[in-house]
Image: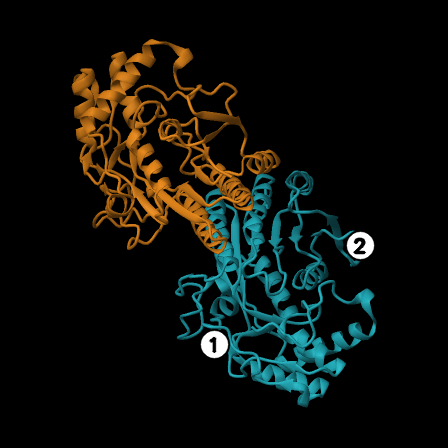
Chain colours: A orange, B cyan
Amino acid sequence: MAGVLVSGAGGFIGLPTIVRLAGQGSEVHALSTRAYPPQLPGVRWHRLDLFDTRSVDELVGELAPEQLIHLAWCTETGRCLHAPENVTWVERSLHLLRAFVRCGGRRAVMLGTCAEYDWSAVDGPFCELTSAPAPATLYGVAKDALRRVASAYLAQEEVELAWARPFFLYGPREAPARLVPSLVRALLAGHTVATGSDERVRDFMYVQDVADALVALRGSSVVGAVNIASGLSTTIGEIVDRIVELTGGGELVRRGALPDRPGEPRQLLADVGRLHDEVGYRSRWNLVDGLAATVSWWREHESAGANTSPTRRGRSGTPQRM
Amino acid sequence: MAGVLVSGAGGFIGLPTIVRLAGQGSEVHALSTRAYPPQLPGVRWHRLDLFDTRSVDELVGELAPEQLIHLAWCTETGRCLHAPENVTWVERSLHLLRAFVRCGGRRAVMLGTCAEYDWSAVDGPFCELTSAPAPATLYGVAKDALRRVASAYLAQEEVELAWARPFFLYGPREAPARLVPSLVRALLAGHTVATGSDERVRDFMYVQDVADALVALRGSSVVGAVNIASGLSTTIGEIVDRIVELTGGGELVRRGALPDRPGEPRQLLADVGRLHDEVGYRSRWNLVDGLAATVSWWREHESAGANTSPTRRGRSGTPQRM
């Protein structure tokens, strides 16, 4: 029994995660529904649909992984917060977890979300130990409920569970309809683009940092919820400014033209004490370098044409608000 | 589209529930894994394993029930509080619920548990609106998490959800290892039997009352959590006294010989304001009549031999503490 099984391994967070794991010499078993995932040194791909529970049982039984990093979830931009598929993903995640435990798994890292927190409480950064979960969306509720069951179940089975709560992230290969890609792509193409209010404050983390934090968390013995975040306050206005510096076309941005959603919080920040002090991980990427890498990636992939661009395309000029 | 689909219909609560539903003229579709469930007027049985998700989809699609009463869960006495099957039942319950919603369901009654409440907080009766859930067992956590996901999902889909929280119940056909059946059976057979401390206070409700309350809840438009309980305080000592009056053999009972579990609460009581005022249901059975009916049932079924006795048998003389 050895190795780490990674679900959602072909995704936005998954791909940099398995690259890092393989780079550390781990035996990486990567799950994806794709027929032709990118070939990476040290990564063994397994084509698997997590909804096919019998195949899950067979594969997990065959591999008997010691560790699990469960990243797969429905991620369709915009719909994801309220999609009924969130319910299905609770079922599938629990099934995968049971197979993992049954086959001798010892440590699981599962992906939660900052949407588990009470977004109406904006007094300060959210802390894993003192901020009570109070999710307001089906996505947040589903993740919160999964965490509750997984925590009680794995504690009883004496399997470690670390519950990673990423905040806001960006980077190469992000779904095109989200804020950063939609801005970058519109400006690179010379289209006008509308944004929401500049003043909103968020914790942004570059996706490679998120992946590296997950790998560090997996390698630690920390259990329970851990915020995966930079610990820094960034306004949406700063994100827009930095992107415009990299792409030009500032006159194409209609700042504040998108109305804020009712009840959308002014600030969403993370206490990163556990990540820094217990996991021993700190962000390595600053916003300028992260956005520069992101813009470079889009320049390359937008010009390379349809073959290498992401499969789900957002409508240009209508970025998703964050 | 019409009718009510009842899962766990052959069980302790399920059987009196479907009898009452059929008596009210409802179109009752009863689910059971049994090959030969009892034939009841007005009840149409469907043999179905809720773990066979494809068959669930087919049957629910065919019936398109307007209402669902979901009672099925793992109930193996003693093991049930910590059984890994609690996790599986979250999965299966969510799958059934999705099929119900997809096929046009309008109102669901699902079975929670008083174990969702914080049993370490024994200041007074638990109230659905003011007592925060804080389950301490995998059973309680699983039910609590299911309620969270089901509530958010059904609210979004505009399907009504009533979440029934029964407290302590007793009656014919209860699993033999539990307090009342084990006492009754031991005393009827002339065996000695040990009990825990007499002073513990619980809310006990006769199972026909529980079934009738569920049927009333199903017929109401009340949504959210509703305690299913008598609103009365009964000590374990009173239960033992009443049973001894009915069976004789008081000298066979070793009162207080079973040590209480660490942290076992002195009292577990229910606020029944919602049940009384909003659902409009009040207990019809008092303890004396309920226990008399229970003892009569055991007299008849113990003497009738193995064919009619329950399938799971507890060890005589070792009642489960409640």
Most extreme residue toward the bottom, as rendered? B251
Query: Where in the figure is residue A23, as x and y percent of width and height?
Result: 36, 27
Q: Secondary structure at mark 1?
A: strand
Residue B36 is labelled as 2
Same subunit, tags 2 and 1: yes
Tell me if I can see residue A302 in this picture: yes
Q: Tell me what residue is drawn at x 33 percent, y 19 percent.
A: A316
Under mark 2, the amino acid is Tyr
Disc 2 to disc 1, C-alpha distance? 40 Å
Tell me if I can see residue A322 in this picture: no
Question: Of residues A304 and A19, which is closer to you in this image?
Answer: A19
Q: Tell me what residue is drawn at x 55 percent, y 37 percent.
A: A60
Query: Where in the figure is residue A317, as x and y percent of width and height?
Result: 30, 20
Q: Tell me what residue is drawn at x 43 percent, y 66 percent.
A: B118
Query: Where in the figure is residue B97, as x and y percent of width and height?
Result: 57, 46
Under mark 1, the amino acid is Gln
In the picture, which quadrant includes the C terminus of chain A? top left
- Residue B125, compared with residue A60, is above or below; it is below
Give the residue pinned by disc 1: B267
Question: Of residues A289 and B40, which is closer to you in this image?
Answer: A289
Q: Earlier in the sequence, mark 2 or mark 1?
A: 2
- Residue B16's image quarter? bottom right
The subunit letter for the residue under badge 1 reads B
Q: Secondary structure at mark 2?
A: loop
Q: Is residue B154 left or right of residue A245?
A: right
